[in-house]
Amino acid sequence: MKETVGIQRLDHVCWAVWKLSDALPLLTELLGLRVVGQWRNEEAGYSGVALEVPGGNGNIELLEPLGDDSFLLRFLKERGPGLHHVTFEVEDVEKAAAAMRAFGIEPFRGVRRSHGWAETYIHPRDSGGVLFQLYTDEDHQHDDEHEHTPPK
């Protein structure tokens, strides 16, 4: 039996939107999700909001582009608002990358480390249309600041 990527939990599902303020009322007022964090990543060109799903273990994340050179702006122009990525916390990102290779999938952009965590991706072309982010927390405090940078 082949090794799996070692998923520990669903961390979040990310929705790319033109404007956070346009999407938030649906999620907070109608669906009853609670805002648990907000951030701005000027370097990567996006701002975001994390929302807690009642009774669940994962969150919903909204991202909006900042500026004309944001990868998120390119994504929205090509595909429109919608699912951007699904993120799972894994036991060990290096082992997850090895399991992906053994399965015949090259980790998109390899394994990257920054802001206290290591991450890799399964590209949508290898998964049938969904970008999967796999990460391991490395000396990172769980707080309201998500500083990851989804691929361009």
Image: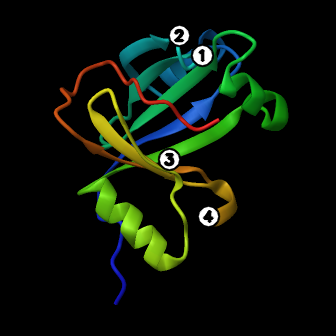
Location of the C terminus (image quadrant): top right
> Residue shown at 50%/18% (left/top)?
48
The numbered dot on residue 42 is 2
Separation of marks 1 and 2 at Cα, in angstroms: 5 Å
Is 52 drawn above or below residue 34 in the view shown? below
Residue of label 4: 127
Q: Is residue 27 left or right of residue 22?
A: left
3 vs 1, front mark: 1
Separation of marks 2 and 3 at Cα, in angstroms: 22 Å
Q: Is residue 34 left or right of residue 128?
A: left
The amino acid type of the residue labelled 2 equals Glu
Decide which of 95, 10 is in the foreground and name it: 95
- Element marked by disc 2: loop
Residue 26: x and y, percent?
A: 59, 22
2 vs 3, front mark: 2
Separation of marks 2 and 4 at Cα, in angstroms: 29 Å
Decide which of 32, 150 is in the foreground and name it: 150
Task: Give the number of marks.
Answer: 4
Residue of label 3: 86
The amino acid type of the residue labelled 3 equals Val
Separation of marks 4 and 1 at Cα, in angstroms: 26 Å
The amino acid type of the residue labelled 4 equals Ser
Which comes sooner in the sequence, label 2 or label 4?
A: 2
Quadrant in which residue 56 is drawn: top left
